[in-house]
Image (spheres, rainbow, N blue to C red):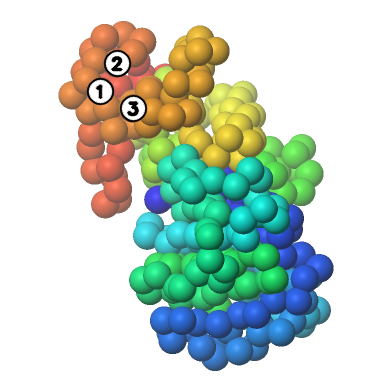
């Protein structure tokens, strides 16, 4: 599932390739024909992300809101030579929620169930399988964003940090659940949740409010570091015990990136005991019961 870093990358990509451009919008699949018609022929004003929510302003009046959910993804194709996404390439490294491809033919035929196609003269972005895709007003977008927990890349860091600590401090649910609650903190999904808890040796089952203010503060600071790193690389490398060469390898090899995520049954990289998986609110939680005992 795409986590906050991917959504910020999508917003950054929209800013680079679409902002200031008149775009064509369509719904090849047909499920978003009405919404696409509202955006078609308008200038893209801005694009931004708050946690897992993506917003793009169109023509001064409208905002496109997209939530990728578990299966959603954008595919972005650029014209060869003039590809503004970077060096032309056939295949980019696998990145959940976002694929950038150069194509020989432009525009390429839509492949599969494309809910929304946004197209400039040189770039086409195809959205498939989102949980939410709608056109709303700026007021509605602002209300929605306000209801979300702080995102380290949006707004003032001191305020955000305080809000995070304050919200966690009055949450009785286990910290493993609280971190995934987008009203408490924005952008954390299953991978970042498991890895943040491990990095702080926190027992996932203790109530969020039982954690000290200092510990919560450092949890927030660490989330900000991981998110920035994810936005930069497009990949969630959450281990900090890697050599520079190892870190490079981890960018290409999913299996080397994490301390505990999807490592159930394997030895913990720190203590050697077995990493376990337990369901937590219908999502798989990975942790090391031997290391993660901090209260
Ligand atoms: Zn361990």
Q: Earlier in the sequence, mark 1 or mark 3?
A: 3
Q: Is the residue at mark 1 in contact range of ligand 1, meaning its CB lies under 8 Å from it?
A: yes
Q: Answer with left or right where residue 258 lies relative to residue 11.
A: left
Q: Quadrant for residue 83, please give it.
A: bottom right
Q: Which residue is mark 3?
A: 255
| Residue 179 visible in rendering | no
User: Callout 3: helix, strand or loop?
Assistant: helix
- Res 48 quadrant in image: bottom right
Residue 213 in percent (x, y) is at 61, 29
- Relative to 281, residue 23 above or below: below
Observer-nearest of 42 and 146: 42
Residue 288 visible? The answer is yes
Provide residue 51's location: percent of width, then percent of height: 58, 52
How many marks overall?
3
Q: Residues within 10 Å of mark 3 (few under 14, many from 20)?
A: few
Quarter occupied by the C terminus: top left
The answer to whether mark 2 and mark 3 are in CB contact below 8 A is: no
At a point 44% along the width and 86% down the height, the residue shown is 30
Tag shown at residue 268 = 2
Contact between marks 1 and 2 (CB within 8 A): the answer is yes
Q: Label 1 vs label 3: CA separation?
A: 14 Å
**Disc 2 residue lies near ligand 1 with CB under 8 A:** yes
When the figure is inspected, residue 190 is found, relative to residue 143, above or below; the finding is above
Mark 1 to mark 2 CA distance (whole Å) = 6 Å
The answer to whether 203 appears left or right of 88 in the picture is left
Tell me if residue 139 comes above or below residue 35 in the rendering.
Answer: above
């Amino acid at each position: 599932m795409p986590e906050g870093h991917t959504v910020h990358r999508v917003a950054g990509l929209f800013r680079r390739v679409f902002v200031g451009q008149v775009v064509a919008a369509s719904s090849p699949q047909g499920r978003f024909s009405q919404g696409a018609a509202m955006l078609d022929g308008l200038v893209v004003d801005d694009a931004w992300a708050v946690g897992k929510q993506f917003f793009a302003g169109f023509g001064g009046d409208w905002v496109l809101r997209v939530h990728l959910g578990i299966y959603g993804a954008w595919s972005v194709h650029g014209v060869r030579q003039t590809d503004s996404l970077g060096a032309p390439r056939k295949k980019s490294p696998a990145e959940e929620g976002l694929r950038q491809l150069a194509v020989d033919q432009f525009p390429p035929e839509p492949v599969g169930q494309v809910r929304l196609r946004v197209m400039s003269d040189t770039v086409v972005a195809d959205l498939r399988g989102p949980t939410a895709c709608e056109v709303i007003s700026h007021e509605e977008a602002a209300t929605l964003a306000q209801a979300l927990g702080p995102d380290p890349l949006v707004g003032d860091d001191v305020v955000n940090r305080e809000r995070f600590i304050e919200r966690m401090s009055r949450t009785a649910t286990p910290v493993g659940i609280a971190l995934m609650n987008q009203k408490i903190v924005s952008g954390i999904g299953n991978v970042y949740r498991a890895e943040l808890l491990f990095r702080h040796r926190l027992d996932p089952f203790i109530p969020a409010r039982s954690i000290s203010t200092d510990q919560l503060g450092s949890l927030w600071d660490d989330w900000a570091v991981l998110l920035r790193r994810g936005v930069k690389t497009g990949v969630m490398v959450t281990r900090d015990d890697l050599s520079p060469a190892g870190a490079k390898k981890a960018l290409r090899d999913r299996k080397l990136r994490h301390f505990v995520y999807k490592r159930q049954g394997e030895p913990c990289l720190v203590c050697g005991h077995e990493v376990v998986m337990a369901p937590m609110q219908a999502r798989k939680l990975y942790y090391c019961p031997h290391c993660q005992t901090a209260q």
